[in-house]
Amino acid sequence: MADSSSQSIVIAAPPERVTAVICDFPRYPEWTDAVKLVEVVQEYEDGYPAQVRFVLDAGVMTDEYTLAYEYAEDISRIEWHLVAPSRMQRTQNGSYDIEGSVDGTSTVTYTLEVELSVGMMGMFRRKAEKMIMDAALKQLKRRVEALEATR
């Protein structure tokens, strides 16, 4: 992805548990701050979501958009892109790369590229992407590790 930002975090859970949380889209409103509604619009034959509609309310920014997802065969990489421009976004491309470790943890790398409908200087856009990724990764870590604690 051209001109994208990436960030990583270590989560105390094996990759299959991390991907299970990432792919359980309807539960995002339970553990993410800005996501208010998620609807799986279309699924692949294997049951993984192919297109997912999001309703976002991040205070100063509200948006509704649909993302198309693709998965690596071993689910170690989950990629997405914006199906059509939304009110706030012209494009959104992203991915999660999930790598397991021998100690039972997973390193999750989040890569994101967003082009907003409103003009924004490159350095501000990259800063916004980093803030989005930081919040998303911390919330993902908190959710996965909370579920692990109940096992």
Image: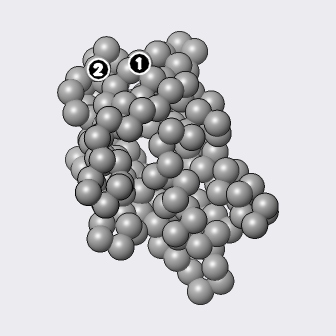
- Image quadrant in which you'd find residue 104: bottom right
Q: Which residue is drawn at 22% across and 33% down?
A: 83
Q: Residue at x 62, y 30 (%)?
A: 33
Q: Which amino acid does label 1 sit on?
A: Asp
Tell me if I can see residue 7 in this picture. Answer: no
Which residue was labeled with disc 2?
86
Which residue was labeled with disc 1?
63
The numbered mark, 2 or 1, whose residue comes first in the sequence reads 1
In the rendered image, residue 31, in percent from the top left (x then y), is placed at: 64, 39
Q: How many labels does the image show?
A: 2
Helix, strand or loop for disc 2: loop
Which residue is nearer to you in this view: 54 or 132? 54
In the rendered image, residue 39, in percent from the top left (x then y), is placed at: 42, 32
Which residue is nearer to you in this view: 132 or 141? 141
Q: How crowded is mark 1: few (under 14 residues within 10 Å), some or many (20 or more)?
A: some
Helix, strand or loop for disc 1: strand
Q: How is the image coloured?
A: one colour
Image quadrant for the C terminus?
Answer: bottom right
- The answer to whether mark 2 and mark 1 are in CB contact below 8 A is yes
Q: Residue at x 71, y 57 (%)?
A: 147
